[in-house]
Image (cartoon, rainbow, N blue to C red):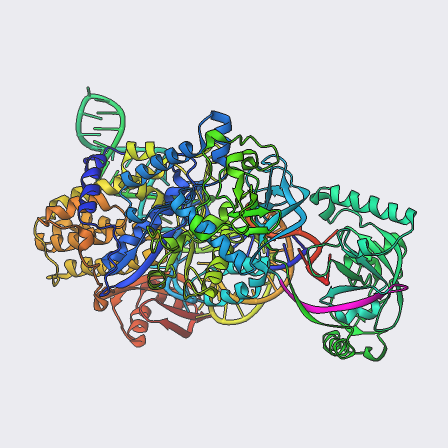
Amino acid sequence: MVDMERDLKSIQEKWNRRWKELSLEKFKNDPGKKKYYLLEMFAYPSGDLHMGHLRNYVIGDVLYRYKIMNGYDVLHPVGWDAFGLPAEGAAIKRGVAPDKWTYNNIAVSSSTLKKMGLLYDWDREVITCREDYYKWTQWIFIKLYENGLAYRKRSYVNWCPSCQTVLANEQVEQNKCWRCGSEITKKELEQWYFKITSYAQRLLDGLDLLKGWPENIKTMQKNWIGRSEGVTIEFRIKNTDKSIKVFTTRPDTIFGVTFLAVAPENEVLRELEFDSDKREEIERYIEQSIKKSEIERSSTEKEKDGVYTGYNCINPLNNREVKLFVCDYVLSGYGTGAVMGVPAHDQRDFEFAKKYGIEIVQVIRPKDSVWDFSNGAFVDEGITINSGEFSDMESSVMKEKVTDFIEQKGFGKRSVNYRLRDWLISRQRYWGAPIPMIHCKDCGIVPVPEQDLPVLLPDSSEVDFTPKGESPLGSHKGFMNVKCPRCGKSALRDPDTMDTFVDSSWYQLRYADPKNDKKIFEKELVDKFLPVDMYIGGAEHANGHLIYFRFITKVLKDLGYLSFEEPAMALFNQGMIMDKNGKVMSKSAGNAVPVGPFVDKYGSDLARGTELFIGPAGKDALWSEDGITGISRFLDRFDKFASKYNKILIKEYVPKNEMEKKVYVKLNRTIKQVGEDIENFNHNTAIASLMELLNLLYKEEQNLSFEFLNFVIYKYTQIISPFIPHLSEEIYQGFNEKDSIFLTQWPEFDKNNLEDEKVTVVIQINGKVRDRIEIEKDSSSEEVLKEALSNPIVRKYLQDGHLEKHIYVPNRLINLIVKK
RNA sequence: GCCGAAGUGGUGGAAUUGGUAGACACGUCGGUCUCAAAAACCGAUGAUGGCAACAUCAUGCCGGUUCGACUCCGGCCUUCGGCACCA
């Protein structure tokens, strides 16, 4: 860092205070103005904010200031995603109560945000662990329950042995816990689910409305939802009155079915009768496969195995009898939990068939070659063979015909399956919103009546939350024992809390009406302020939060609490800040550079500038303090120069000579570029163009009038202000202005003065640059050619060749094709 | 394996979307100022050859289209994300 003339830290507090007096951060709800809802993903308060968080917030603040200068009434709230596991971890490790730890972190982080001078409407702050918030999280749960969208199910769930809790599908990454990285195991438990699968199609369709979302996020969601179209076909089990349904996307291969396979969890296995040996064999296999860790079971390297059930099934299309197996490569949660085995045309079935000596019947051949099965299964489209009356067709055509046939004959019907699973939301943890349900011996499950909400989380001093694999709340008698709201007899509360992603799935709605204690929010307000116009946050939430909050929005819309389909119309994914080794900066990784001390040392403007100049906001960036040097030098140069020419406020000025004209053009170009760059989140190039202009001003200072320089500095200060707000205010104040620069109107660029009168035209010979000439803007092709031909270098090249033709690109280049 | 993003000087990164590759910075080297240092200021800085003018080569690799390709097309390689037996 260089020595700066001004102490940036000393001006901070003054302006932070002044902005507050002016209510600069407040959403005015002014009907005369265009509304803009700007939202950054709220943070989990795990300590002080680090440079990664700061990037998110600074990007938002730059846009906020730019938008208010452009006349928008901007809603820009802030809050904390405050429930969650690390708070319990801190309590266990350091003996601090989770709530104390959380509120303390919030206090530290908030003070950093305020010190930075980031403009947030603090009156709208939400904290998800506060009862005035989680009351409504519980209310949402009840609404889902009342509408059949929250249900209990016993099944094999993802279990983190270290966190001692269940996890949603979205919280398992590479078979490891998203929080602690432990290997996930399976556990059979009865848990609460949200029926997100019944919104699968709407979540998919909604993506088309989201024009402002990055394509890659939409693709990720599309893949995660994973829609597949196919047919569900029923196979009778021979010598029984039962049958098995299979789902397939490849009915064109149905004549190649040589076995059937069901998942170990499949119900049919409990219904069928077996002799004792068989039963034992099957049960041993089921037990084994459920015990296996998911990674083992789902590894593609692992040999496929299974057990013959002793039952055979009938293929309704050709009446062929095939064996029925139990296989753990069949997933219980997808489709019907059973598949038809077509070894010739599915690689997994192929491997299985090889191992168990099952026949491989080819029913599709490549269009113009012979398939060699030593390469494995043939999985592409082709021409059908060995398929009775459906032989000798394009497989895609046959697929339609055979599907129609299957439907006509009643063998099965067209169906759609989704990869998406229901959202498992129960957690066996303390620090979360209690599930507002009561278990009564006589009445069953009864929701807590609305007037009894919130179900308060007991004080941490009364609860032992060291992980034991059971809900900590379960051993708190005062919490657990209630009267059944229906029959009045003794009953028990649900001991689990909700996934924190439930908390964050609706916070953007609460900001519209954060203090309402009668309702979750006033419909009128939510409808007026939402959807979010710009949502800023990391791409890591693509298949978690960003699906959940869309889901909850759709549910609340269907229930009539709001009138729009999608929570956020535009999404911007900022890149992550990495350490020198390319590791993502985070508290848990131990490489976090905290914002607080950094700002104390260098000041907010320098911190902002450094973070913004590091690279395009959408890309990952390595954190390095080297960037401070360039920015501090720049700010110092700006400050020194601007402090000389912030004396008379001149809003309009007509350039008086050529040099002023040149600078005027550059100014206009810079205004244009900075505006565009802010809208596109390319802050690095915006700052680069400001640097260019400043360099030019230094160079030409002597040739420019005092009035002109005052005019330029006014505009310059306006357009640099979103990046370095405090210093900009200092400069602006020099003009003897009382108000904030952020109350001025963002300058418009003069469309007629974006280019110089003279342009540099490149002369190419056969595509290679040989010289450049200065020429009047918009010169004709003939003029430029004439000029080029008189150029000494061109003449040299023309000596041993002739000009065959030329290409002229106006104001850019002329390419002369010279042939020998 | 499938889906997505990306590969440009010593470094971070630019390039009006097919038209001057390397803007703007950092760093390095040289100079001015200074007793000295820091800061500041001025200059040089892709590589190779040449005293020089200049020439040749350069945007992961190989081809192609074009007057002209970092940009478009075909085929690879590498890195990073997402998914992962989804029938």
Q: Please, is residue A534 above or below residue A99 in the view? A: below
In this view, the residue farthest toward the front is A488
Residue drawn at (26%, 39%), measured in percent from left and top? Answer: A633
Place of residue B59 in the rendered image (x, y in percent of width and height, measured from the top left):
50, 53
Picture quarter containing residue A609?
top left
Horizontal arrangement in the rendering, residue A60 relative to residue A338 (left or right): left
Q: Quadrant of residue A313?
A: bottom right
Q: Position of residue A766 (x, y in %)?
A: 44, 66
Q: Which of the pair A577/A556 is nearer the observer? A: A556
Q: Nearer the viewer, residue A608 or B35?
A: A608
Which residue appears at 77% of the width and 45% of the height?
A289
A238 magenta-colored: yes
* A474 to A436, vertically: above or below: above
Q: Position of residue A532 (x, y in %)?
A: 38, 59
Asked if residue A1 can be seen in this view, the reply is: no
Q: Position of residue A160 (x, y in %)?
A: 62, 39
